[in-house]
Image: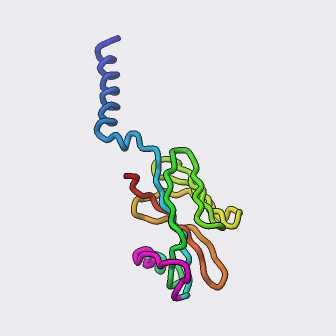
Amino acid sequence: MSTNKLLARLGGVVALFLLFVANPSEALATDLKVEARLVWGTNEDKSPNHKPVDSALAKKLRKVFKWQNYFEVNRQTAAVPLNETAKIKMSSKCVLEVKNLGSSRVEVVLIGIGKAVSKNVQTLTPGEDVFMGGNDKNDSAWFVAIRSVDSK
């Protein structure tokens, strides 16, 4: 083997080694940690069973949707391994199936009362919520807010 070929191969090995040593969490990161919040949107002032969502989330929702008040029904987190799907039970009527496609991309199937309501492929940007949801009775709605969270 010529010296140039040997140096080229060694250079590749050294570069790979440096990638792992310089930032091992990036090189080995395959799990994606997600947080999902089930939210009820309504014009009712109070919910007998739920606390209001934080003001930042309520402000985002009010800009897009017609309801004035938003209440958190449930919050769950899950680590989703690369190329695998996690089922996240949000309530007795709501389940999420989140598949980690890699590079912060997920395929999310929202299941309501045993039936697929929607299916989306999204990139989860840290600090940003992705919303899925639908109408409910009494001029209200439910949403699932999904975001990636730091796994540290």
The structure residue drawn at horizontal position 63% and vertical position 66%, both measured from the top left corner, is: 94
Q: How many marks?
A: 0
- Front-most of residues 87 and 132: 87
In magenta segment, residue 36 = no
In the rendered image, the vertical position of residue 1 relative to residue 110, given as above or below: above
Q: Quadrant of residue 42?
A: bottom right
- Chosen colour scheme: rainbow
The single residue placed furthest to the front in the displayed view is 49
Q: State whether residue 65 is above or below residue 116.
A: below
The magenta span reads 45-59
Which is more toward the observer, 139 or 92?
92
Q: Position of residue 39 (x, y in %)?
A: 54, 73
Q: Nearer the viewer, residue 36 or 14?
A: 36
Residue 109 drawn at (x, y percent):
62, 59
Residue at 49% in and 47% down: 102
In the image, residue 31 above or below residue 46: above
Q: Residue at x 29, y 34 (%)?
A: 18
Extreme residue in the top direction: 1
Q: Position of residue 82 (x, y in %)?
A: 51, 45
Quarter-wise, where is residue 38 in the image?
bottom right
> Does the magenta segment cover residue 53?
yes
Residue found 46% across the figure and 61% down from its top: 147
Instruction: Please say if 5 is above or below 56.
Output: above
Which quadrant, please, contains the N terminus?
top left
Expressed as whole percent of the image width and height from the top left, the position of residue 3 reads 29, 14
